Image (spheres, rainbow, N blue to C red):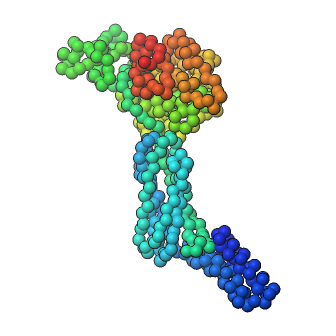
Amino acid sequence: MLGRFGNLTIRGWCLFAAGAGAALCAVLVGERDLLRVAAFAMMLPVLAAILVISRTRIGLQADREVVPSRTPVGGDCQVHLTLRGTGRWSGLLLLQDVVPRALGGPRRFVVAQLPQHREVQVVYPLRPVERSVHSLGPLIGRVADPLGLAQCHRTLAGSTRLVVLPAVLPLVGLPAGGEFGGTAGGGAMGAGSDPDAVVVRSYRQGDDLRRVHWRTTARRDELMVRVEEWAQRGGITVLLDHRATAHRGDGPTSSLEYAVSLAASVYVHLRQRGTRLRLVTVDGAVLAGDGAEHPTDTALDALAALCATDQRDLINVPVPAASQDVVAILGALGPAAVEQLLVHHLRAARGHAVLLDVAAWATDSDGKVAPDPAKAARLLIAAGWAVTVAGPQHPPSAVWNQLCVSSHSRLRVPR
């Protein structure tokens, strides 16, 4: 009986309390008719609770499927809920699927009737706007009597993962020396092993036409471009600065989300060009390395789950292998942080840095003063790095183009 009382709603408890009060008054004044009414008022919530419990004992199962289970920021996906009943079901079934607030909050549905031994599908759309690994669920079913005097909750389905990937934008071009980030035999040709020999490869979209080697083009009847350096390079390390203190703004419009999207775009772009890559973060984590065991999806999934770190310095920055280029996407940097970065990358063949002007992402409520990126840019340029400064008004494609130009001509800021 106590278990059944636990399923009463506020309305049910009020009716039961009113019946109990009426019964007490009926006993005191000796009114049998009032006592009958009071007994009916007290029994009605109990009968409703028994009815609800009997309904929940009917076999009821549910499954959830997210299509697709991996989607980029701003992409469309659908959640399919499949309900199956193994017994006769009547009455209203109230469903609530727990959805994170970043995806729009919980979804609620009403199923008027569930046919016996048949399935009922409920579909609702999602358009995620924030990069993360979200958990949908559990799916909770609530059964109530027609008068709303009693209800019972039951978990019908567990949790389902939805991976929201960072936005990957198309990029064009390569920084200076990037041609030899590929694997051995990546299509370059030269005369023997003479370091002064001209090395050429097939033209790729985005290559500078000024580097076309016309003699080889005429001989092979195929557009060929010069490769600047003969020495085989060790690939490229993409470094992402995800320190909480180095970024400003909140949510999907923060400087951290801009940096993650740019890092994902650079990684995918270089990977498509056959470049040997490592994707690392300033806390020493290697999100993806070179080789078939680290496909592009692995890097994007790791970036989707990446959270800001409380680390304040750059003492744990991974050291690149010898002859590796570095493409660093950095937040706010002070002089000390620049020195730490240069110490860890002394062995790098070439350094390329995108400095975010995080003050442009700051709001009046942030109350944080960001270092001027121009000072860090001057220090890095003096150390031989190619540097460009990016703000929220600069598209990642324009920032990457300017970095490629800066690696040749040492221009400092994007136009």
Q: Nearer the viewer, residue 81 or 279?
A: 81
Q: Nearer the viewer, residue 53 or 394?
A: 394
Q: Which residue is drawn at 78% across and 83% down?
A: 25
Where in the figure is residue 11, as x and y percent of width and height? 65, 71
Q: Which residue is drawn at 58% across and 18% down?
A: 372
Q: Residue at x 43, y 15 (%)?
A: 406
Where in the figure is residue 390, as x and y percent of width and height? 49, 23
Q: Quadrant of the C terminus?
A: top left
Q: Which residue is drawn at 56% across and 13% down?
A: 379
Q: Give the side of residue 41 with respect to residue 238, left or right.
A: right
| Tally of numbered discs | 0
Q: Can residue 189 be seen in this view?
A: no
Position above or below: 133 against 22: above
Where in the figure is residue 137, as x and y percent of width and height? 54, 56
Q: Nearer the viewer, residue 310 or 213?
A: 310
Q: Is residue 86 visible?
A: yes
Extreme-right residue of the structure: 28
Q: Nearer the viewer, residue 211 or 320?
A: 211
Where in the figure is residue 272, as x and y percent of width and height? 36, 31
Q: In which quarter of the image is the N terminus?
A: bottom right
Position above or below: 229 against 11: above
Q: In which quarter of the image is residue 414?
A: top left
